[in-house]
Image (tube, helix red, strand yellow):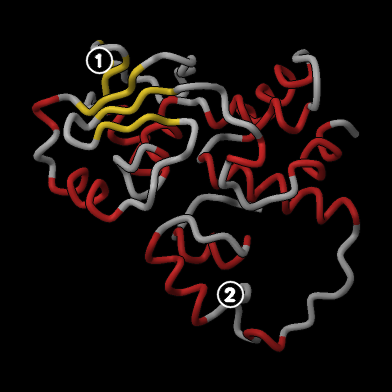
């Protein structure tokens, strides 16, 4: 499944809203795109197809490539404990994901762009690598000159409550990672167990 192209079509295909606009479309049309609409016969899904769909959902929600996700899975297998939970933690502690969860961006795509364009600091130093791992105790912040950016301000005003593992200072546009998140704290819509099954084949 190709994850490039219009975000609304991808969201409808996966059944996961990747942007606020896609969320509105999914409310009206909660089915995959196509000329047959909701009456289209999907047929019985094979186990492989279910695994593939869940893997693509996870990829899309973190905006990572197939190679990146496979590498994260390999790292997760080397971490003691549940592989699925470890995989989620590795993805969730990416810098762009932290920017999204702190409420400084409305989508993972915007969060990545802000990091790439130098709007984001980690412990006071500018970082332009979206995949940079954020460690417990580290502070992610929007650079002072970027706090008047209209899109960042809009995200901060519209964002829901920040994730429980983050300590957010809205006035300073900063967030400290208090601790590594537990799997049930991470707001991802997919069956991680099926993703693990896909890669462990």
- The crowd level at tag 1 (other Cα within 10 Å; few <14, some 14-19, many 20+) is some
| Mark 2–mark 1 distance (CA, rounded to whole Å) | 40 Å
On the image, the x and y values in percent for residue 95 come to 42, 25
Residue in view at x 49 percent, y 17 percent = 133
Q: In the visual, does 181 lie left or right of 132?
A: right
The residue nearer to you, when weighing 159 against 30, is 159
Determine whether 195 is above or below 160 in the image.
Answer: above
Residue 45 shows which numbered tag?
none
The residue nearer to you, when weighing 140 against 13, is 140
Quarter of the image for residue 148 reads top left
Lower position in the chain sequence, tag 2 or tag 1: 2
Determine whether 149 is above or below 73 in the image.
Answer: below
The residue nearer to you, when weighing 67 against 109, is 109
On the image, the x and y values in percent for residue 124 come to 24, 12
Residue in view at x 54 percent, y 35 percent = 64
Determine whether 9 is above or below 190 in the image.
Answer: below
Count all numbered tags in the image, as a single digit.
Answer: 2
Determine whether 22 is above or below 54 in the image.
Answer: below
Check if mark 2's residue and mark 1's residue have beta carbons within 8 Å: no
State the SS at label 2: loop
Task: State which quarter of the image contains the C terminus.
Answer: top right
On the image, the x and y values in percent for residue 35 come to 60, 84
Nearest-to-viewer mark from 2 and 1: 1
State the SS at label 1: strand
Quarter of the image for residue 32 reads bottom right
Residue in view at x 26 percent, y 25 percent = 141
Residue 33 shows which numbered tag?
2
Residue 126 shows which numbered tag?
1
Residue in view at x 51 percent, y 25 percent = 93
- The crowd level at tag 2 (other Cα within 10 Å; few <14, some 14-19, many 20+) is some
């Amino acid at each position: 499944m190709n994850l490039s192209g219009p975000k609304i079509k991808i969201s409808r295909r996966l059944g996961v809203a990747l942007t606020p606009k896609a969320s509105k479309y999914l409310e009206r049309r909660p089915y995959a795109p196509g000329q047959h609409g909701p009456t289209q016969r999907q047929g019985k899904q094979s186990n492989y197809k279910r695994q593939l769909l869940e893997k693509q959902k996870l990829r899309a929600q973190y905006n990572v490539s197939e190679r990146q996700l496979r590498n994260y899975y390999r790292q997760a297998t080397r971490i003691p404990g549940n592989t699925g939970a470890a995989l989620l933690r590795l993805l969730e502690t990416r810098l762009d994901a932290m920017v999204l969860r702190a409420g400084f961006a409305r989508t993972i795509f915007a969060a990545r762009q802000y990091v790439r364009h130098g709007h984001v600091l980690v412990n006071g130093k500018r970082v332009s690598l979206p995949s940079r791992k954020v460690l417990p105790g580290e502070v992610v912040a929007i650079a002072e000159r970027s706090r008047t950016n209209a899109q960042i301000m809009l995200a901060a005003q519209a964002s829901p409550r920040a994730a429980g593992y983050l300590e957010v200072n809205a006035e300073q546009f900063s967030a400290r990672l208090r601790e590594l998140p537990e799997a049930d704290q991470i707001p991802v819509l997919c069956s991680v167990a099926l993703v693990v099954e896909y890669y462990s084949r």
